[in-house]
Image: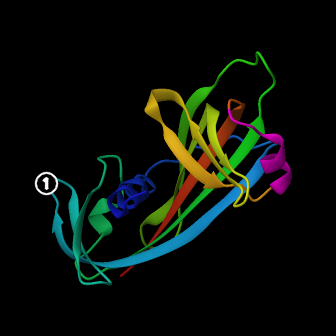
Amino acid sequence: MSLKNVFTAAAAALTLAVALPALAQQTEIPGDMVTVKGTVEAIDHTNRVLTLKMEDGEFDSISIPQGAKRFSEIKVGDTLQLRYYDNVTARLKDPGEPAVDTAEVGATPSGAASPGGTVATQRKMTVTVTAIDRENNVATYEGPHGYKYSRRLQNSELAKKIKVGDRLDVTWTEAVQITINP
């Protein structure tokens, strides 16, 4: 996920409040936690755009959705911290089992004195394994809408079971937590 997409997803956390369904009977393929920080350099209230100066000195602009009720509380000089995490789970499908292709977004406001919160996106899809690197436990697969992806399988038992042509139900959960410090 690009930094701009992380910021866009985080902006939604300022307003949404929907719970995600629980995951069940799947093998976890953990991802990495990424933390980025930026300082609000400018605010375009009319177009609802924040300009941030990142820790590396680069500038990035993010759009804040209309529904973000606490947008007006953000001030020039505030520091934004974004923590991004993704997690993938996989389940070998039974032959003839119907394909799935769903996406849900949920978020929870922080409830803190300053604006912030957490937004999560969960995408569940049926994919077909197109390549396997057994030495490194990496599977490559294709899914709906031209989706192609490779991921290291932490569960070596799943890596031993799957073969090219197998179908998996993959659930990809991304979460972004935004904290704004005045």
Q: Which region of the structure is painted magenta? A: 156-164
* Percent of width and height locating residue 148: 50, 40
Residue 19 visible in the current orientation: no
User: Could you say where residue 35 lies in the image, as x and y percent from the top left?
Assistant: 48, 75
- Looking at the picture, does residue 42 appear above or below residue 8? below
Q: Residue at x 74, y 37 (%)?
A: 163
Majority secondary structure of magenta residues: helix
Q: Secondary structure at mark 1?
A: loop
Q: Is residue 9 visible?
A: yes
| Count of numbered circles on the image | 1
The question of residue 62 being in magenta is answered with no
- Asked whether, in this view, residue 42 is left or right of residue 163, the answer is left
| Residue wearing tag 1 | 46
Q: In the drawing, does residue 50 fall left or right of residue 46?
A: right
Whether residue 160 is in magenta: the answer is yes
Query: Looking at this view, is 119 or 3 the one in front?
Result: 3
- Residue nearest the observer in this picture, 115 or 169: 169
Residue toward you, 33 or 52: 33
Answer with left or right where residue 100 lies relative to residue 23.
left
